[in-house]
Image: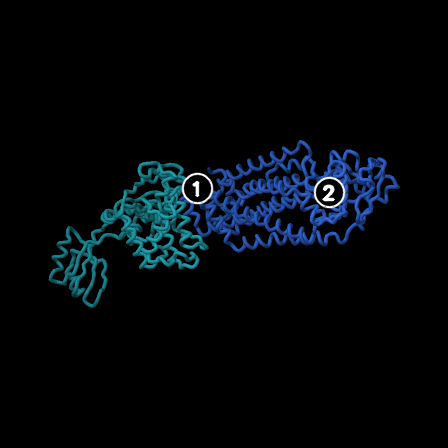
Amino acid sequence: MRNSWIIAMRELKERLGSRSFILMALLGPLIVLTFTYLIFQFGGKEQQKWHVLIVDPANVMEQKIMVKEDPNIQYSFANNYIEIEQFAKEKRFEPYDAMVEVNEKILSNKTCFLFYREKPSFNMSINIRYQVERRLEEVLAREFTKLSVSDFRKIKQPLNFAFRNVYDPKNVTGDLAGWVGLFFGAVIFVFIFLFGMTILRSVSREKTNRVVEILLATVKPRALMLGKILGIGLSAFIQVFLWVLIIGFGLYLMRETIFVDMYDASNQIEGQVSDYNQFVELVFDRVQFGVMLFYFSLFFSAGYLFYGAFFAALGAISGSESDGQQFLIPLILILCFALYAGYYALENPESPWTTLLLYFPFTAPVVAMVKLSAGFTDGDAYQLFVALFLLLAGAILVTQLAARLFKNGLLQFGHTLRLKNIIHWLKVR
Amino acid sequence: MLEIHELTKRYQRKAAIDQISFSLKKGEIFGLLGPNGAGKTTLIRIINKIIDPDSGTIRFNGDLLQQKHLAHIGYLPEERGLYKQMTVEAHAHFLGALRGMSKTEINTSLNYWLNKFNCADWRKRRIQELSKGMAQKIQFICAILHEPDLLILDEPFSGFDPVNVELIKAELQEMKLKGKTILISTHNMRSVEEICDRVMLIYQSKKVLEGRVTEIRESQKTGEYAVRFRGNMIAFVNALWIDFELIDKEILSDDRFVARVKMRGDNSFEDLLKALIGQVKIEAAWEVLPSMNEVFISTVTTENDEE
């Protein structure tokens, strides 16, 4: 392990000193921040105009929603019960694009449903969610506490606001937070791919310049492989950390300067109850970044270890640096499939296929992030730990097999890589 | 020091080395010879535990060779490899640490060797800034940095200019005097004659020859003698008459030659000298032993013919 650590530290120093690392650490977060800014600043310019019917038989919302009217959303209130079928089929409800169901239990279970005819745009869903939730916060703060609305917001639990198709109310589609999960999952895979390629290139280069022979005269192949994966993994972690730091700081700056949160006590004007800020809503309120980052770290580490072993083995068994490219294609396809699996999980969070993809180590990191941000249904949270366990077990198994390929392929030079070579090297202990 | 017993390694069905046994004594320089593809590199890799043998044993100072023993072995492979982006110092620290050395030990040893090889000012330079020969020197230094008890060198003289070849040879001799054991795999037969105490020749995965360099050359001598003389070549040939056969001659100047002569019948070296004295002025005369190059070629050719 000592030698693995020495190798890891050498790899880490080399990566940290490279221009590409510094460039990626700065450019990556700046690109993410730019896109975030563009989405929130200009994404809502071509907004849908919706007429929303709020069915509120208990009169919880007192037929009020916002002080300042939203030009794109017109709310109407109904104080009687309306069934989904009625809303979907009856002609009198046709002018309404969506129906928000607010019943008397909302104050205790904090669950609210919106049934739409056509899927709302990103901005529309954020705005409705935000406006309804803020109004409910006012009610909750007044009914149950002596706190001001701004103080209440600091301690509140988020509202479970589910968007469902009125014509297919049981098909639960992923919500906005799920997209954030997909973003986290995509980041995991981008990093796994980029740093996996670094492993592959590093191993190939050491084969080409024959440093590997000197190293193998001192360390075992497995220790060498683990050292490489560990060192490059640490540099990936530092890269991620820098991204989080820069993006976090950037988002904070945006909140303070561009997307000022009107609910912040310091920004609140006496008597003015509400104005909305979709940026703050999604980025700061909706997503639980602490939890997400914690699980991101776990799934990123396990996923990186799982895929990193493949990349290391591929580098070791390649006859030349270009030789590995052809065998890289299946690996890239698997990574693409994993991203698709994340999207599938976003669209079908409760599907048994999603659970299967969550347990499948190749797709687990993305699907887990999507599921985590979209939220597990009651009693299903254990799935996350099962997925993590299976991913770790898969990583250990893959590392064992990759170590065998690494050992047997590392000192083979100038050959053309064929599948039969791989099978033979897997058999040789 | 190192005992190798019936070592065999096969790649699929082909034997890379077959039932090879030999031993290295403390404080000797041992030459591992053989044509390309004979199995020398495989043998060296097995001794370095880079690959495992199919059968056979290796004992290092009496114990079965284990990973821990590698800290006492230095290795310079045939294909030189260095991290081009790293500085000489960083490289030495990396490889030294892998061999279990502390930072202080590495610094002390690195200073000593850089000064000894007149390259102290290369310390902070990147490997890519060095010439091939300079990089070779650094690689040699890295191989001996931890003062190994056993040093394995695969073609150690390739890439070096004659001055540096002599420098390396002198260093190897010095290490030998300090009790270090050195295993050299090389095609440079002159170096083998000059510095190796014993050699082993591998041919087609099998050991075909082993022994002291002088004894091997002695055993393959063909009864040739060389005479360096001043005088007339015709007079020299006439003096040989029918008792001796002139095989070859080398003209050193107008009246100075080196002639190679073979005995006929029961004639001895003394008879040759008696026949020549008075006819030419003898400067030197000696028995010609086959060079290691000749031993190598004749052994490999014989083995080929036998097949």
Q: In this view, does B52 lie to the left or right of A265?
A: left
* Observer-nearest of B245 and A102: A102
Secondary structure of the residue carrying tag 1 is helix
Q: In the picture provided, is A148 more to the left or to the right than B38?
A: right
Give the residue drawn at x 37%, y 45%.
Answer: B44
Position of residue A138 relative to residue B281, above or below, is above
Taking the image as shown, residue B81 lies to the left or right of residue A94, namely left
Q: What residue type is labelled 2?
A: Val
- Residue tagged 2: A149
Q: In which quarter of the image is the N terminus of chain B?
A: top left
- Quarter placement of the C terminus of chain B: top left
In this orientation, does residue A73 appear? yes
Provide residue A113's location: percent of width, then percent of height: 77, 38
Of label 2 and label 1, which has the lower sequence position? 1
| Viewer-nearest residue: B298 or A129 | A129
Q: Chain A is drawn in which colour?
A: blue
| Residue B302 visible to an observer of this rendering | no
Bin the neighbour count of mark 1 within 10 Å (Cα to Cα): few under 14, some 14-19, many 20 and up.
few
Q: Which circle marks residue A371 in the picture?
A: none
Q: Chain B is drawn in which colour?
A: cyan
Q: Which residue lies furthest to the right in this view?
A: A92
Residue lying farthest top? A379
Front residue of this view, candidates A224 and B158: A224
Q: In this view, does A144 lie above or below B141?
A: above
Left or right of residue B182: residue A206? right
Q: Name the residue under label 1.
A: A2
Chain containing the residue with disc 2: A
Kind of residue at badge 1: Arg
Q: Look at the numbered discs 2 and 1 and tell me whether their residues touch, using CB distance below 8 Å.
A: no
